[in-house]
Amino acid sequence: MFLKISVLLLGLSISYTLARRLPLSLTTNEKIQKLHSESLVLAEVHQDTSTICFSYYNPKLNLITVQYEVDYDSCISAYETSSKQVENCYKSARESIETSAFQSCSALYACNLASNAYNAFECASITAAEDAKIFYAISANATDAAIKSKSDYSRVDTTRNVCVSNAEKNYVENTSKVYGLLNSCLLGNDNIPVSTESTTTDFTDWSTYDE
């Protein structure tokens, strides 16, 4: 019996180890840590229910961690896609500024290739006046684009943060729920589960249950 309990405790430890790959804010969540510790203690005290309870709930804890990783990766993938879309949206504007600046500077530089000093200075005087208009337009366009792109990037960042926050919220709520059910099972307060549910269980629905 001691061997069985050791194996089950190892399984729970593996579940908790999988969670170690999560952000620090989740692995140090006070509620989850408390429930995890309670499970270890209850497993030692209630060895008669440990085997079936751990066999039933350990896979669920693992799946919640896996689901969080899937959700998190989805958030980051969507964020990267949106960021690239913003970049592509302003690509032509950046190229236009680069082209205008290069042409203006090249024209002014070419003045120095004039046959004599007078022609060089005359060329520079006229070209610089035209360049001033061009650079003023560049400044105005760049300022407008900077304001718009900042807003777009902010929107993308906010969407990512909300997505990650929801994934973390689901993880904490679902993990806490399963630990609560596991501990209740160990105490014999609920009917002992007789089979393991499909691995496709939608854990996010559990967050609507009462604590």
Image (spheres, rainbow, N blue to C red):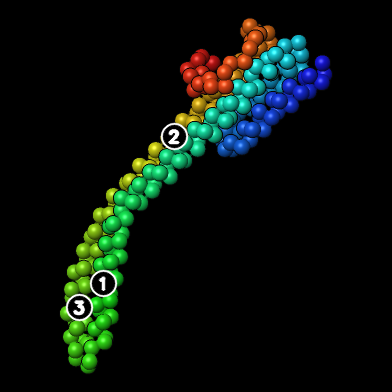
107 w.r.t. 5: above or below = below
111 w.r.t. 97: above or below = below
Q: In front: mark 3 or mark 1?
A: 1
Q: Earlier in the sequence, mark 2 or mark 3?
A: 3
Is 128 situated left or right of 49 in this image? left
Q: At 73% across and 15% down in the image, what residue appears? A: 51
Q: At 38% across and 48% down in the image, what residue appears? A: 84
| CA–CA distance in space, label 1 to label 2 | 44 Å
The disc placed on residue 103 is 1
Relative to the observer, which residue lies in front, 5 or 29? 5
Three-letter residue code for mark 3: Thr
Q: Secondary structure at mark 2?
A: helix
The disc placed on residue 127 is 3
> How many discs appear?
3
Disc 1: CA contacts within 10 A as few (<14), some (14-19) or many (>=20): few
Give residue 92's position: percent from left, percent from top: 28, 57
Give residue 143's position: percent from left, percent from top: 27, 57
Three-letter residue code for mark 1: Gln
